[in-house]
Structures are given as C-alpha cells and as structure tokens.
Image: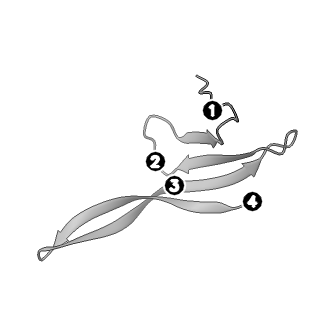
Amino acid sequence: MAHYTLTVPVKYDDNGTEKTTYRRVGAVFENTKRDTGETFLTLKLDFPVGATELVAFQPSAKGDVTE
C-alpha cells in the first residue's frame, strides 16, 4: 500500500522575499477494492475540518458524477 504526505502550502514574507513552506495536514493511502481490483485513495486528516476522512475514486468511464 502506497502512502503520501498530504500538505497545504503556506506562503510568508521573509525580509521582502516571498517564501513557501508546506504544512502537513494528513496522509493519503492508495488502496485496492478486493472484489473489483479498482484503485481508490483514502485521505486521513490530522485534525477535524468538518470531516476527518475523504475518499477519492477514479472517474468512471462515462465521466458521470454520482451524489
């Protein structure tokens, strides 16, 4: 299972020079459905922001959006 660090860019001014640091906000895990072999991502956030976990799926072949 692959995993990635989830960050947000934070820009700041350092003596007239704009710099960017990256603040960790969570982790992203690549998973596979057992029955279909489909790959999906799970995002685990380090702190609550209304939801503590988000799941992203690859778009369907039709490009449909399901709510």
Tell which residue pokes out farthest to the top in this image: 67
As measured in the structure, the alpha-carbon distance from the residue carrying label 3 to the one carrying label 1 is: 28 Å
Depth check: give the residue in front, 39 or 6: 39
Position of residue 47 relative to residue 66, above or below, is: below
Residue lying at the far right of the rendered structure: 35
Crowd band around label 3 with a 10 angstrom C-alpha radius: few (<14), some (14–19), many (20+): some
Residue 32: percent from left, percent from top: 78, 48
Q: What residue type is labelled 2?
A: Phe
Q: Which of marks 1 and 4 is nearer the N terminus?
A: 4
Residue indicated by mark 3: 26
Judged from the image, the secondary structure of the residue bearing numbered disc 2 is: loop
Label drawn at residue 47: 2
Residue type pointed to by label 3:
Gly
Q: Distance between the residues labelled 4 and 3?
A: 16 Å
Label 3 to label 2, Cα distance in Å? 8 Å
Alpha-carbon distance for marks 2 and 1? 32 Å
Image check: 4 left or right of 51? right
Label 4 sits on residue? 1
Residue 10, image x, y percentages: 31, 61
The quadrant of the image that shows the C terminus is top right
Q: Which mark is residue 63?
A: 1
